[in-house]
Amino acid sequence: MSAVWSLGAGLLLLLLWVRHRGLEAVLVHHRWIFVCFFLMPLSILFDVYYQLRAWAVRRMHSAPRLHGQRVRHIQEQVRQWKDEGGRRYMCTGRPGWLTVSLRVGKYKKTHKNIMINLMDVLEVDSERQVVRVEPLVTMGQLTAHLNPMGWTIPVVPELDDLTVGGLIMGTGIESSSHIYGLFQHTCVAYELVLADGSLVRCSPTENSDLFYAVPWSCGTLGFLVAAEIKMIPAKKYIRLHYEPVRGLRNICEKFTEESKKKENSFVEGLVYSLEEAVIMTGVLTDEAEPSKINRIGNYYKPWFFKHVEKYLKANKTGIEYIPSRHYYHRHTRSIFWELQDIIPFGNNPVFRYLFGWMVPPKISLLKLTQGEAIRKLYEQHHVVQDMLVPMKSLEKSIQTFHVDLNVYPLWLCPFILPNNPGMVHPKGDETELYVDIGAYGEPKTKQFEARASMRQMEKFVRSMHG
């Protein structure tokens, strides 16, 4: 009982302090208080709800049966829009704050909202090695469904809450993309409801012009209602090799060399300064040395990017065996390295052991509660940008990032870009090796001005044929 009284007294003092300082001041300057006491517990409730829902759907096998009914409801909404004259643009009715993006689209308020409640795994076809899913299925949900069955998908973008629809209509990438390409390149078919209300299936051999036009189209061609994705056999562990590299030219040469090796199942680089990086290469395996197993996804473990940095500081190579699902979602707990700006002590061992099981807070809830002051702060003093450029321009690109942004760490992820039809392809006629350079955080360069600096970066990327 004394513990309850102590907790109550603590909460009362906190509320009095918030009232004294003002809610907006607390949310801007002490956001970690609101995140730790409110958003993290709320995020747990969100996760529990969706996990229970997914479990119930699997147990009752209701997803395939209800899918057709839900698609027909979407078709009815589109036809109703058409009957009304189609004067407004259509968009999905999913609230903007639910998306894994800093941007909150204002268009939702003026467009015709089409409700699309499609969030289930529909079918696992082991014979064809294809999984059929609805567009709001997340990466965390999909790996949790497939891994116990001995399957995974070739490209698993890191963050748990990324959805299949977003990765197709936008873009998706992972450290296996130097072999399999972008997320879109692992898809074999899409099903869409078009603007006339018709349901269409497209693949490389059926309505192929639509199939190749869908990726990166941001939902402008139709409403995605299902996708078929290739599967590959899953293995228990990733044998991960860490190698610190110093000197920008050495970093670029080493990263390019490892990205060209098809025997590497995974290739990733974390650049900690202009002259320092750790290059990681991984291989799928079912065997592991027990003393070198690192379950990096456990809540009390150090954040992955901090763990990697230890090899740089010690200036030594290393090998670990990481359980596959832990590896696939290695950047989830720290939202890459974004969470350190929200909870500065989040990687402290005491915090990890006591509260790490509630991390990370949902990105959607962070957006929903950020307020106008924080939104403007992020728009003007924060970047979340991925630039996809040919591998041959990596050195020049990192130098440009350093001058224009000066944000570290930088994320390096290689991918092969085939010369397929559609919006995204190499400049030449042949498949080419590209690299995703991800900059996430607060720019340290003095001349940074959000709009002008981004336009300058975009101009550079275009000049590199990125």
Image (cartoon, rainbow, N blue to C red):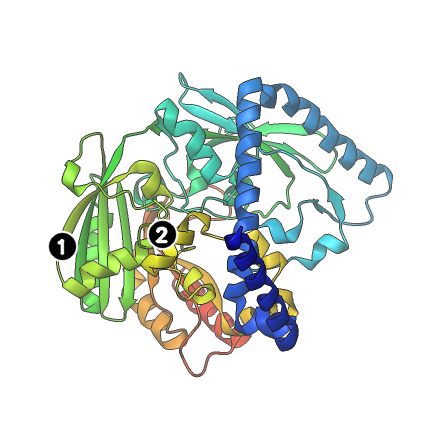
**What residue do we see at 44% from left, 25% from top?**
130
Closer-to-camera residue (308/186): 308
| Residue situated in front as seen by the camera: 230 or 67 | 67
- Asked whether 54 or 216 is in front, the reply is 54
On the image, numbered disc 1 is attached to which residue?
Answer: 317
Horizontally, residue 395 falls left or right of residue 115, namely left
Numbered circles on residues, count: 2
Up-down: is 145 above or below 238? above
Q: Describe residue 388's horizontal placement relative to residue 391 as left or right.
A: right
Q: Tell me the amino acid under the disc marked 1.
A: Thr
Quadrant in the picture for the C terminus = bottom left
Q: Residue furthest bottom?
A: 446
Residue at 19% of width from left, 65% of height from top?
Answer: 313
Mark 1 or 2, closer to the camera:
2
How far apart are the two marked residues, 1 and 2, measured between alpha carbons? 27 Å
- Vertical order, 200 against 266 (above or below): above
Disc with the residue nearer the chain's start (1 vs 2): 1
Amino acid, disc 2: Tyr
Q: Position of residue 121 (x, y in %)?
A: 52, 28
On the image, the x and y values in percent for residue 282 come to: 23, 43
At 81% from the left and 44% from the top, the residue drawn is: 86
What element does badge 1 sit on?
A: loop
Residue 153 pos. (x, y %): 39, 33
Q: Is residue 85 above or below residue 71?
A: below
Q: Secondary structure at mark 2?
A: helix
**Which residue is labeled 2 in the image?**
353
